[in-house]
Amino acid sequence: MRKLSSILFLIIPTIFFGQQTIQFADSIRIAYNIPEISYAVIDSKTILEISSLGMHSTELPDTATINDRFHIGSNTKAMTAFIIAKYVEKGKLKWTTKFFDLFSDWKENSKVEYYNITLQDLLSHRARIQPFQGDNDPTIPDFKGTKQEKRKAFGKFVLTLNPVEIDTLHKFNYSNAGYTLATLMLEKVTKKSWEQLVEKVFNKDLKLNVKFSWPENQKTKDTWGHSFENDKLIPVASNTDYQLDFTEPAGDINIELKDYVKFIQLNLQGLQGYNNYINAKTYQFIHKGIDGYSLGWYNIYENSKELSTHSGTAGTYYSLVHIDRIKGKAYIIFANSFNQDTQQGVRLLMRKLKENYRS
């Protein structure tokens, strides 16, 4: 009986936190006008809490389910870096491989400031590449061909542009286009497209059911992203025509929360010293190898805490992930809208989740 009592003692606080969090999360969702929120608290082996609340769309009666898919925006970067890390381990690339070692014929028409940029520089935003974040971007030519061919033409074009000024405060200059260039290096040595490599690594090998672009909401019941126009959330159909300026490897994946949890658990295991799909020492480098922004993750040290964090949006969904590297826990929040209210509501929920698991 003593053993059973101790087990119940461990379970009851988790249930209590879960009930508390659901009520709090739904109040946040309503107060900040977020159609749907899904969240999870996990460690390397266990889902401590997981829930989905709200509606697929402001204009539909479909209720949230744990199987809903969300576009994760720039949290795609960590997944692209993860794929590249696998092929670094295979010996196809080195973190120090220079871009122009693989694309020497591009050098003549590229800016001299880029001549020595490496794979590591591109993934950690140290290559001074133009950001291409949607604000005041240079005009992009109308490239033709397959997605891979367009990315290649875009990459060649990006290298003709003036480099950005060095950010002396943060030591890095965030760039979606930099991830396109890193992906071109991967595609060159594997002779496969980024899309094919996503399918192989995440779908075939890891069984995570990753998809591209917006979640499909026209043929199935699933989430609708919501843009913000004229002070109103507008549902966005999955067949809406849009493009990320050929920076898909920086931000164009959608996934179910429970599958994303599995990806983050792989990272937690690696940070705790265990090999899995990639080696523990590789996870250490991905998360902590470079100050400020490492490879697909912000690398944060503050108030005796160590965190890997990232947020993501392409304007219609919002995702936020915090990995507490000391406690070995991660906190994940997905929302199907994006504006200042969404960001504030998600931040408040993140704070609550972390307060619940302070000990």
Image (tube, grey):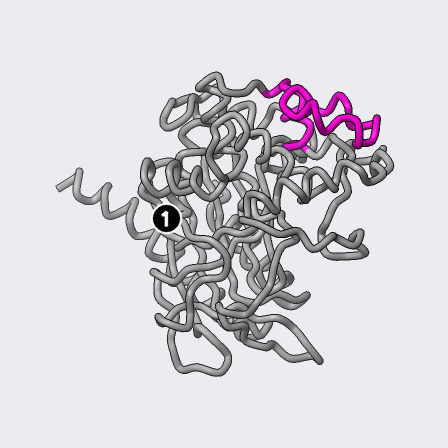
Q: Is residue 88 magenta?
A: no
**Is 100 located above or below residue 137 in the figure?**
above
Which portion, as a residue range, is magenta?
A: 95-124
Query: Which secondary structure lies at badge 1?
Result: helix
Can residue 307 be seen at all in this image of the molecule? no
Residue 89 higher or lower than 7, as above or below:
above
Q: Residue at x 55, y 48 (%)?
A: 147
Mark 1 crowd level (few <14, some 14–19, many ≥20, 10 Å Cα): some
Q: Residue at x 81, y 56 (%)?
A: 136
User: Residue 18 lies in what quarter of the image?
Assistant: bottom left
Q: Is residue 330 left or right of residue 114?
A: left
Please name the amino acid that badge 1 sits on. Answer: Asp
Residue 170: image location, x then y, percent = 78, 35
Left or right, residue 278 beside residue 252 = left
Residue 102 colored in magenta in the image = yes
Q: Quadrant of the N terminus?
A: top left
In the depicted view, which residue is nearer to us: 113 or 297? Answer: 113
148 or 220, nearer to the observer: 148
User: Left or right: where does residue 121 sit relative to residue 236?
Assistant: right
Determine which residue is flagged by label 1: 259
Q: Position of residue 207 (x, y in %)?
A: 31, 42
Secondary structure that dominates the magenta span: helix
